[in-house]
Amino acid sequence: MAASDAPLVAMLGIVKRFGALTANDRVDLQIRRGEIHALLGENGAGKSTLVKILDGLLQPDAGEILWEGRPVVLPDPEAAARLGIGMVFQHFSLFDNLTVAENIAVALPGEGGRSEVARRIEEVGRSYGLTLDPSRPVWTLSAGERQRIEIVRALLRKPKLLILDEPTSVLTPQEADGLFTTLERLAADGCGLLYITHRLEEVKRLCSRATIMRGGKVVAACDPRGETVAGLASLMVGADVHEVRPAPAHAVGKIRLELNNLHLPAPDLHGTPLTGAMLQVQGGEVLGIAGVAGNGQSELFAALSGESLAPRPEDVSIDGAPVGREGIDARRLRNAAFLPEERLGHAAAPRFTLSENVVLSRHATGGLVRRGVLKTGEAQRIAREVIRVFDVRKGGEDPPAATLSGGNLQKFVVGREILREPGVLVVNQPTWGVDAGAAATIRQALVDLAARGSAVVVISQDLDELFAISDRIAVLHAGRLSAARSARTATREEIGILMAGGHATDAA
Amino acid sequence: MRLELVPRGDVPGFVRLLAPIAAVATAILIGGLVVALMGRSPAAALDVYFLQPLGDSWGLQEVALKMIPLVLIAVGLSFCFRANLWNIGAEGQFVVGAIVGSILPLALHGAGAGPWVVVAALVMGAIGGALFAMIPAILRVTLGVSEILTSLMLVYVAQLGLDWLVRGPWRDPKGFNFPQSVMFESSAQLPPLIEAGRLHAGALAAIVVVLAAWFILSRTLFGYGIRVSGEAPKAARFAGFDANRLVVAAFAISGALAGLAGIIEVTGQIGQLKPTISPGYGFTAIIVAFLGRLHPVGILFGAFAISLTVIGGENAQIMLKLPLDLTTVFQGVLLACVLAADALVTNRVRIVRTVRA
């Protein structure tokens, strides 16, 4: 028997590398029985990697997992489940056409008939306040009810540790309240709960301990009830910044890009609607848009670029012209340029060569097409120029985009847009997953473009980056864009609170 | 442990050229092994299958005749497949092309019209095929219906329509009640290329189509749009291409070429409408398209290989008493080898061991 004072689970010195990236760097995490333990961090901080290791989905490169004081190896999720580790994922894995009971029965092979399962569902539902009708087909249920199925499914295996990955991201506030009651009852029964989120208010309300990760490392462990939201936010986003201010003195000019009360419905089930977005970007400035992923960044980018059309022409303006109903090529013809988040597959076609990828965003605006026929020589010339100016390292004369490293491909696609000298540039996550050298080159290019009189919008999750290059910063949370405030006077705490959905004093 | 395909950086041009040759050699080796296991001489089979059809004018013309519809349909299909659209109804578009193309030749039968009739017939056949192919395309872009099912099911509609026509309104009244139309007049038939030969002017159409398709796919913005929308749909949207328009256009081109193939087959070879005018060209062309790696010039070689095995297979049946199924087996092996060679040239295989802590 393990000592009863040993933590339920202890992860010690966990290291996990993906190529050059260290996703978990000597991470320690301990969860006790009956506690609700928050795992906090921005996207890319290493939370998901750590949790996947705990659920047996990933194997650590180094480190040890102690379960009730004894070292264990978790080769797969089934082994984790046998120990008593249950997981509720952010996105549901349910069969829409089956009933609640059938969905739960498929996850519990060889455990009684369907009526037996239905009886147990009602039993668990009664004791934890998880009301579910076992005979309802899943497609008739709301997001909150679907999540209850996932939780009941996990609870029927009588877990000692339940991991919840951003459980409230798809719930209404009322559904979230119901969930919190359930979790508190579970904890009171002695179950350990690991609660992954970036919503700080929830953490303060629910959790008795918090482990905060940033850049793959644990940066703090604390009792969130004794911290302020601002304090937690600054721990999460980091205060140790190299305050670079490379922008040379230059005049800020007239408004070149404008959003005027843009409302846009969500493009799909997991999308985020944009509500009442207002934005004015002047020539000569870099405007940063901060926010945690999934708060409407892709939707905002699509609305600015014209990949999604706005309801009214005047919703989006470029250099004073209403362009809300114009597509991406028409906006490019107004000397705007755009760069989406996803390098391979969106900003570039993976198996197309670099010169073919020049055609992708340049065919509408410059000398690459005559009477429908491509001028491949011109595309190759532009590709060579981008490669030279942005120091793109590659194998071969004109290799496929997919063969370049992330940083080099990003330099190429950034260069492709910037060498056009656009008057307006909108980029989404310009240095995501890019090595430090390439990131510096890209940031410098963005700042220099603004200094030459262009309006530059940078959507990024990296607050360090935004503070380093932006003149003003706005925050996107749940599809709402805050007023922009000066990056020189704004504090990291203010921005952090806005990112977590709190309210700061508006000082725009 | 699992296998992963990792893209190679730069593949030299000559390796890309060698890959299909190596694939054909491998397929012949496997085919030879099968023949040997059946107790026949692989050398004799090789001779009958691949050398004899190429040894005389008759054999060459037969191979070329089979190639014409296969090349036309497969080139059209390559537009759809490049755009990641699964048009598997080319057989139906072929039949509808033959039907619509036959309207004028049948209506003007005995009216003494000039050779413009056959030209008009080809144009109408292409239009008919295009319109028929646009049905699944329009259903897909407006209602989100899978083009795979609709295009396939329309094959049966087309075949039954032809069946009804040749048994009903278009039946030759002097045809002893056989379900077939009158023979087209010579002004409504494609002229032979060689004096007294079987090969007809449709071969020229196939060559023109191959060259035009190559130019459109590799050198025009429209072809670029087709390719990028299949390779990376989000990138195509980023480039400003209208996905729905591309879907309809790709299907229209594919259907037009299948329809053209249909009316060429009728006006060049058969000379009349019958309940069955195709031994499954529309389906075989899918294999041809992938054998040619969706490249118009590659399709020319792919169609050659398939035609050769069909003619050779007929010979082998007679001379070596080898079953016709062997031809189908060989076609499958050939396709698998070509696709495998393609994958192995552009990727290398990496064995990943799952690390356990």
Image (tube, helix red, strand yellow):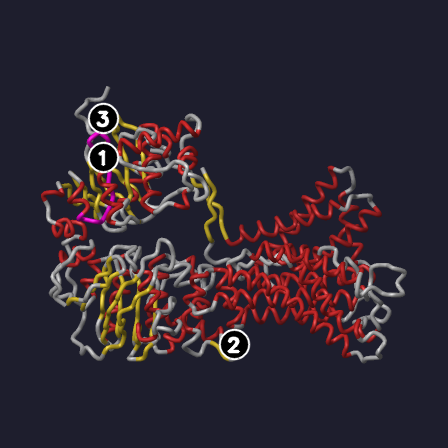
The residue labelled by disc 3 is A69
- Point out the tag, 1 or 2, that comes first from the N-terminus: 1
Both labels 1 and 2 in a single chain: yes
Residue B39 to residue A241: above or below: above
Task: State whether discs 1 and 3 lie on one chain.
Answer: yes
Estimate how packed mark 2 is, as few (under 14), some (14 to 19) or many (20 or more) residues with alpha carbons within 10 Å.
few
- Mark 1, residue position: A12
Disc 3 residue type (three-letter): Gly
Task: Say whether residue A187 is left or right of residue B331.
Answer: left
Query: Where in the figure is residue A383, as x and y percent of width and height?
Result: 41, 70
Circle 2 marks a residue in which chain? A
**Numbered-mark total:** 3
Q: Which residues are magenta?
A: A187-201
- The answer to whether marks 1 and 3 mark residues whose Cβ atoms lie closer than 8 Å is no
Q: Looking at numbered disc 2 in the image, what kind of residue is underneath it?
A: Gly
Q: Magenta includes A299?
A: no
- Tag of residue A372: 2
Tag shown at residue A150 = none
Question: Label 1 to label 3, Cα distance in Å?
Answer: 12 Å
Q: Chain of mark 3?
A: A
The residue furthest left is A226
Real-space CA distance between mark 1 and mark 2, rounded to the nearest whole angstrom: 62 Å
